[in-house]
Image (cartoon, helix red, strand yellow):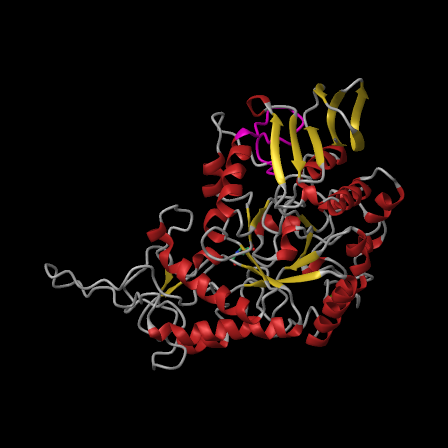
Amino acid sequence: MNAWMKNGVFYQIYPTSFYDSNGDGIGDLKGITEKLDYVKSLGVDGIWFNPFYPSPFMDGGYDVADYCAVHEMFGTMADFEEMLAKCKALGIRVIIDLVIGHTSDKHPWFVQSTKDEKNKYSDWYVWTDNNFNKFGDKSIHGLYPRDGGYVINYYACQPALNFGFNTPPRAPDPNNAYDLGEYWKMHYTDERLKPLREEILNIMRFWLDKGVDGFRVDMANSLVKGCLYNSDKDEDIEGVRWLWNLLIGTIKKEYPDVGFMAEWVYPSNAVGKCGFDLDYLAHDRQEYNELLRNEKGTNILPAFEKGHTYFSDDGQGDIENFLKYTMRLHDDVEGKGYFSVPSGYHDIVRVAEKKDNEQMKVMFAFLLTYKHVPFIYYGDEIGMTHKFGINKDGGFIRTGCRTPMQWTNGKNRGFSETDGELYLPVNDVAGQSVETQEEKEDSLLNTVRKLVKLKKENEAFNADADLEIVSCENGGYPLVYRRLNSESSFLIAINPSAKPVSVALKGEVLLSQNCETENGEAKLLGKSFIIVKE
Ligand code: NOJ
Ligand code: CA
């Protein structure tokens, strides 16, 4: 179990959009280095960086063409090392994206594997055994000389690396003379898959030797085919479980302090069974929303902005299933790791969309005091909204949450000096910028800083400290809970709705918004929260 992840608050940076140091309109590593003092000023412990590797950027860099190098638009390996050194000097952990479910179709390994002649890389990708044998709607045919179709993980340009299948290859049906079986589906223990696994371990070693602290593993649940990753049945995840325990187990023996965060979206499996230290709950996944759907059929994830959420001020939200589900998760991951409910990330509509800064503060009061590991998506701390109608790098609607960080109210929002075009356009909604919010003591930015500080100063807010739900009638408003350990106890009440409510509480008020306290009672006006040390 990883020690530094549990107490941490993390920040996520999308490299094209944080800061452009050389005026070419594209964010870069030197630019990030220049802004690390700002990141440090938030009080966070670490940064997760989206991919910065050489890539055709057909999917925001999640189509890697070289795992051990830096894309030239972001700078050089020396720039990365300088950034890492400054992170270390500031006490900021570095988590990088490890995208090993697939590569780009331009990766030299894949180029080799498309050839008809057998070579070192022929088995590194999942290919069917003749061009007309398909793998459902997940294989692409007819593009290359090789007699077969390649299985994809996401877009067509993202061929799946071959970690095998959950079940042994299927033999031909004796009653069907035309059936040749499915010998191309190698079992996950097949010896032919070992060289790829070794290479993956070496990629991790490459970055860990540079001083990187951990990995966020893209589509970690996808590596062994035929697994039902959100199933609770052991046999359904046997292969992927075997693989991750092997990979993580090997690396942890060599680098005991490394942290592994999964993109699995099912912590019961990723953390509970597969060796990860952390997994996160993605707001945009259908299967996850199915799990959490309440009777009213509304989305109940706190930060999901489609329909009613608990954090909309219409007061229609219902957080009961979320609470029930996360209680179950706490049991499933206990003693092994943690999960995160991120404020946002690079794949979803910005959480500040349709929320004002007061609502955002209520949401952050929740995210920075609840029992989990908080991740703040860059710009959420100043309430950056979504820019609809733009599309770049295969982002489509997701592009709108990847716009440049809004540093100032001036040219290009202080992101770039260029007079030319920006790689991604700025979102020109007025008001939300670091410059504006630095000055005001109770701005969203400064409130986030205060909340992070409060959390960091009190171990009762750690992911392994206790949580007690005090009251939340029918999943409605307010939500009152306690965070505690053997030394201290805190009561938190949040009321994202516009309707006032009352809560009985005693103690020292540490932080609040729109609250009036008198004689052991707090009146929580609309869009309010209060944190009390009992
Ligand atoms: C999840 C990443 O977050 C997303 O941006 C990407 O498109 C897919 N995985 C495919 O790698
Ligand atoms: Ca640049």
Residue 170 placement: quadrant: bottom left
- Residue lying farthest to the left in this orientation: 175
Looking at the image, which residue is at 12% across and 60% down? 176
- Residue lying farthest to the right in this orientation: 439
Looking at the image, residue 497 lies above or below residue 174: above
Looking at the image, residue 85 lies above or below residue 230: below
Looking at the image, residue 315 lies above or below residue 177: above
Is 164 on the left or on the right of 470, as rendered?
left
Looking at the image, residue 215 lies above or below residue 365: below
On the question of residue 65 being in view, the answer is: no
Q: Which quarter of the rendered image does ligand 1 occupy?
A: bottom right
Is 275 on the left or on the right of 343, as rendered?
left
Number of marks in the image? Answer: 0
Looking at the image, which residue is at 81% across and 55% down? 38
Q: Position of residue 422 (x, y in %)?
A: 73, 59
Q: Quadrant of the N terminus?
A: bottom right
Front position in the image: 455 or 31: 455
On the question of residue 447 being in view, the answer is: yes
Q: Quadrant of the C terminus?
A: top right
Front position in the image: 24 or 46: 46
Residue 22 placement: quadrant: bottom right
Q: Position of residue 94 (x, y in %)?
A: 67, 62
Q: Position of residue 145 (x, y in %)?
A: 35, 75
Looking at the image, which residue is at 55% across and 72% down? 254
Q: Position of residue 224 (x, y in %)?
A: 39, 61
Q: Report the magenta stretch's main SS.
A: loop
Is 114 on the left or on the right of 29, as rendered?
left
Front position in the image: 83 or 29: 83
Magenta segment includes 162:
no
Magenta segment includes 306:
yes
Magenta residue span: 302-320
